[in-house]
Every structure is written in C-alpha cells, then in structure tokens.
Amino acid sequence: MTYTFGLDTFGDRNGDADGKPLSHAQTIRNVVQEGVFAEQAGVDFFGIGEHHTEYFPMPAGDMVLAAIAASTERIRLGSAVTVLSSDDPVRVFQRYSTLNAISGGRAEVILGRGSSIESFPLFGYDLADYEELFDEKATLFAELLKGGPVTWEGKTRAALLNQDVVPHTESGPFPAWIGVGGNPQSVIRAARLGFSLALAIIGGPPARFAVYSQLFQQALRKFGRPPLPVLVHSPGHVAATDEQAKAEFWPRWRDIIALIAPERGFAIPTEESFDREIGPHGALYVGSPETVAQKIATNLRALGATRFDLKYGMPGLTHEQLMTCIELYGRHVIPRVRALCRFLSNQAFVDTET
Amino acid sequence: MQELSKLAVLGAGHVGPVIARLAVKAGHPVAIATSGDPEDIALITELVIPGAQPRWAADAVADADIVVLAIPLHRFGDVDPALLGGKLVVDAMNYWPASDGVLGAFEDGGSSEIVARRLAGSAVVKALNHIGYHELEDRARPAGAPDRRAAGVAADDPAAVAAIAGLVDRIGYDPVRLPSLRAGRVLQPGGPVFGAVLTRPEFERAAREDARTLT
C-alpha cells in the first residue's frame, strides 16, 4: 500500500510574536514560503482552501499555488477545497489545468463546499440552491476533466455545444476529488461521477466515517467503475511536545470556533471538549510527532484511506510556529506513519497466516 | 412485549440516517425515504442504516405511526400536507439562515410553529433538531448512564410530547418536555441549547435563563 501525505491551509491570518495580526498580504507571502518549504520537508501535497473572510483571506488560492509551483519540482499542488457551487466549472478547470501546465502535471482539485459559505452572497448565489448548483457543476466538471470537446446543458450556466476548453492537459485528467462531511448522498455522487473521495473530519470520532469509505467503494462497483482512493482531511498542529502543541493551538482554536459558532451552530469549545478531540478518539491531530503519527496511522487503516492531509495553522499562530509544524510533519510524522503502516500491515499478514 | 411504534424518516442526508440508525438500534421498525426512488438509497440504507427499509415516501408514511422530517427546510414546501394528515410528525428541521440561506416564510417566529400551521392535520413535535448530526449518535447513552445528555421535546399537544419523549428516551437522551411549540423556540439556532450537548440540569438552567430574557 502506498500512502501519501499532504498539508492544507486556508490562508489562516498569521499573528506576530505578540499576538498582533499580520497583514493579509504578508500572510499570503508566508503561505508561498510554507508551500515551498513543505516540499523541502518531504511533504507530498500542498493544498489551499478557498475562503473569503478577514481571518482566512484566501479567495484565489490557485494564484498562490502557481507561485509555489514556480519554486518547487516535486510536490503536488491543489485546492482544498474549491467552492464549486459559487464558481464556474469552466473557469475552475481552466485555472487548474493552467496550474497543471506551470507545474509540469502536479495539479489536483478537491471540489466541495468546505465549511465556506461566504462565497454565496459574495457572488450572488442563494444557499438554498446549494445542492442543485453543486450537482450540475460537478457533473460538468467531470466532463471537462475528460478533455476533448464538451456538450452540456443545465440551469446554472450557459450551455456548451461541442466546445473545446483550453488549455488541454498533457497527460489526461488531473486528480479530482469531492470533499464530503457526512452526507451519504454526497458519497454516492462522488462515485457516480468518478471522483475520488475526500473525507473532511473536523469533529467527533473518525472511525464513524469508515462506513462512508465502504459505501464509496461499493457504489463505485455498482456504477461499474474501478476502485478510487480515499483521503482524510483533518485539522491539527505539530510541535516538539504534546504540551507545547496544545499550548500553541488551543487558544487559537477556541477563538476561531467561538467566532464562527453562531453561524455554524457549533458549541463553543471547552478545554474538556478540546482534550477529547485531541485524544485517541477525537478528530484533531495536535501533539508531538509521535502522538500525531500514531493517530494518523490508526485512522488511515480504520478508514481504508491512502492519503492524509493535515489542515495546519489557525488564525493567530505565527509563521515561525507553522514552519516548525511543517518541518516536524515532513521530517518526522510522515516517515513514522509510513513505518507504522508497514508494521501494522506485516502484523495483519502474520495474523492471517497463523 | 408491546411492539414499538413504526417510524418513517424523510430525508437521507446528514441527519436522516443518524436518526434512523438510532431508532433501529432502539428496536423501532424504520423506513427511510427521499423525494425519489428508494432504489437510489438502497446502498446507503444497506450499509449506513442496516435494518431500515428504503421505501417510497408515500408508502413509508402511510404505514408509519411517527414521521420524522429530516429534509432541508427549503424543501419543506415540496411535502404534501395531506400525506402527513393524522400523523405524529417530528420536525427535526432548522431555520438557519447563516448556513442555508434566507427563507422569507420563516423569517418571523418559530420555524416549527410555521411548519405546524401548514401541517394542520398532524400533531407536530419539535425534537432532535438541536444536537448536531455528528454528535447525536456519539453522545447517546442508555437511561441512567452518568454522562447521559438531555434533548428537548416541544409540542402543543401533551400526548404528542409524551410519545416523542418516549422515543427520545429510547434512543439515548433524557427528554426535557416543553409545553408548546412556542416554548420550543429555545431549541432553535441562536437559542441557548442549539449546538450544545448538555446534561438535564444544564439544559433546564439554560432554557430557564433564556425564557427570562424573552419575557
């Protein structure tokens, strides 16, 4: 089994050492540095999630990815996620196939809603139309990915008749995923359209998502498609020790969840609820490299997933804290997870032999 | 042993399957339906809600004692009130403009009161709407467990409250009875217990304090 490991950011606005927020512009320049450094640290994928807020000033992640592409050679680059419902699938395809050209075939895209809803009023869409918008646009995007002229008709954008959409990719479709957060019908849709599955797990026990992974593979079979990979996206933070990671991350997590809780219906986290989430049965990966690696290895296997993307950072953390997190994740967590997964696979082999 | 009431869960998105699974586990016969063909949710039912039956909505409702509405509120207008006539209906929906967009018809007052006005031939109970779908299952506990949490049950008809309080108790929460749909506004988004998973004393205190600020 080949496992791959990514880092995702929402362009979380950095703080300075005194807790004062840096500018949006400086935060964006820091994200470019972080992406380039992620490659040096040995990370396989760097993803940028679309957001439109004061604390996640990241509406044009594809431009940031292009800057990272110019200074890297190996790391794969993609969205995490693109809010497809409030975008034009033709434009999204064009931007990411341009990124694919710049990077020599390293582009990916994860389509979804994420937890982002700000783009709907911003671009004049009604949230009540979310399902119809996403379904139509994902269907069109699947057609665009195949390459070649597209004929399509729907309610959410102008029809296309035998339309050639450029730039063409050099070697077929780039990897495309649909991000889901717990709606089984979204899992079925990903399988029906032939997208890979990205499980966004941001609260509660990750093991409860295992059924979605099984549902996805069975649905692929039902639709006559070959197996496709499953990835897990979860938030977290790595520092030298468990104590330091928590001390850095917890106040930032508390502040941001308290800020967005009214619109998302989240409960304001308490230290007790946070400790549950960073414990073995929670959704957050906060701790020393060993703590985080153990948890990733356990959950990759429980969920039948072959890729793990850590959503690193949180508004208010410093660029230096994030660089340390990236270094520890790339140089220590990833090799350790690979070793643990190898060990566990061998164990399973031994168990079935005896 | 008395046979438990039959449930029809309408909606197979985030919320419907979780409620259906809890009800199956509690021993209720459960049918699940969407606006479409049951074949479309056959695989979901088999894997995610084992023990439930995927059915056409009209058939599921016709055979049910309790109908759970777990569809997006903006699709509520597509539900035929005649279909639900004479049924005990659990409204697990929410009016949550920040998350789902503004709906003119729900801008004033409690969403379940507006639902009940349209379903005049049904007994409408507001319940199972205020604990997040991702937590509803993880936090369920058997009666008497020290870490059992509370869930609100609000309706204008005391018999309907009692019936759904029984369901809530069986699926793993201490029911807190509220005497009217009006009082059930404390369960809505923006209310003191929405999104929080509280013990009964915490729940009752939060609801009481909120009631004081309303008067």
Image (spheres, rainbow, N blue to C red):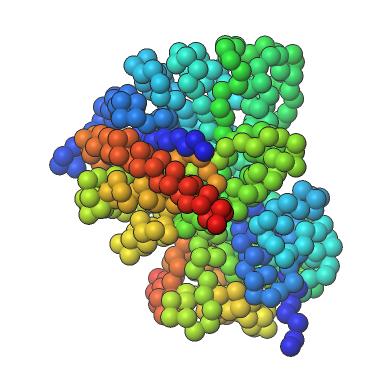
Q: Is residue A298 left or right of residue B91?
A: left
Is residue B178 visible from the viewing direction of this image?
no
Residue reaching furthest to the front:
A354
Q: How many marks?
A: 0
Image location of residue A227, percent across then percent down: 65, 37
Between A326 and A28, the one lying in front of the other is: A326
Q: Quadrant of residue A169?
A: top right
Measured from the top left, where is residue A149 in percent x and y? 71, 14
Kindly identify the residue that appears in the image at 64 percent across and 65 percent down.
B21
Say above or below: A106 vs B203. above
Q: Is residue B191 left or right of residue A290?
A: right
Q: Is residue A195 left or right of residue A332?
A: right
Furthest-bottom residue in this view? B1
In the image, residue A108 above or below residue B68: above
Rendered location of residue A15, percent (x, y) = 23, 38
Quadrant position of residue A112: top right
Q: Is residue B157 left or right of residue A40?
A: right
Which of B15 and A280 lies nearest the eye of the viewer?
A280
- The residue positioned farthest toward the left in the image shown: A18
The residue under the point 45% across, 35% down is A4
Q: Is residue B169 above or below residue A24?
A: below
* Residue sitting at x 80%, y 65%: B61
Position of the C terminus of chain A, as image quadrant, is bottom right
Give the x, y percent position of residue B134.
52, 58
Q: Relative to A155, say whether A67 is above or below.
A: above
Q: Residue at x 73, y 64 (%)?
A: B52
Please say whether residue A283 is visible from this viewpoint: yes
